[in-house]
Image: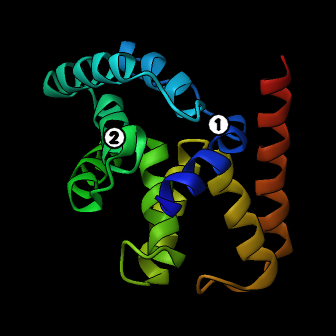
Amino acid sequence: MRDLTMLRLALPGLLALFCWHVPAQAGVCRSEVRPLLLQAAPDAAALAAARTVCETEASAGDADATYQLALFHLGLGGEWDPAEALPLIRSAAERDVSEAQYWLAWQSESGPELPHDEVVALDWYQRAAAGRHRLALERLASAWERGELGLPVDGRQALRLRAQIRKCEEENAR
């Protein structure tokens, strides 16, 4: 339950920090799930309906719906089963869903669900950043500034990433 509380507390801020466009193949699933994530106690019928939509879209090959479906196994609706979520997240990440890539990077760096591996974390952060994931861009900029994740200190790389972050913020402000 602690993990669900942490997810709900972090989510509103996290949702505002993305600088990507919803994938062209994204369907209704995302629009059904996002409001539920922001509610302390989502309606059971709304959860069931959203899950059905996500399952249908994921079965049809929608990578974003696959990631959204994983959120049900990570606390949405009270279920906590990371073993069920991980294959879904990996599948979505391999199909360029930047949120899934960031999640794998974060867990590989510091989370309890994956083994600590900075090389793997760096790879996923870079892939998420290529998809313009704002938190991945931020983490990589900090890593270049501090010489973390096996990267040397390089202020130019950090500045380049910070410029991308500013561009994201400008786009989000519009």
Residue at 37% x, 71% y: name it. 113
| Residue 10 location (% of width, % of height) | 66, 50
Which numbered tag is attached to residue 5? none
Residue at 66% x, 49% y: name it. 9
Q: Nearer the viewer, residue 41 or 123?
A: 41
Q: Is residue 62 left or right of residue 115?
A: left
Residue at 42% x, 62% y: name it. 104
Tag in front: 2 or 1: 2
Name the quadrant containing residue 144: bottom right
Amino acid under label 2? Phe
Name the quadrant containing residue 21: top right
Q: Are marks 2 and 1 in contact (CB under 8 Å)?
A: no
| Residue 128 location (% of width, % of height) | 52, 51
Residue at 46% x, 58% y: name it. 1
Whether 119 is drawn above or below 166: the answer is below
Q: Residue furthest left?
A: 59
Amino acid under label 1? Leu
- Return the disc, 2 or 1, that comes first in the chain's sequence: 1
Q: Secondary structure at mark 1?
A: helix
Residue at numbered disc 2: 72
Report whether residue 51 is seen.
yes
Q: Quadrant of the C terminus?
A: top right
Report whether residue 26 is seen.
no
Residues at marks 2 and 1, CA–CA distance in whole angstroms: 17 Å
| Residue 89 location (% of width, % of height) | 31, 50
Dot 2: few (<14), some (14–19), or many (≥20) neighbours within 10 Å?
A: many
Which numbered tag is attached to residue 15? 1
| Residue 151 location (% of width, % of height) | 64, 83
Q: Secondary structure at mark 2?
A: helix
Dot 1: few (<14), some (14–19), or many (≥20) neighbours within 10 Å?
A: some
Whether 42 is drawn above or below 146: the answer is above
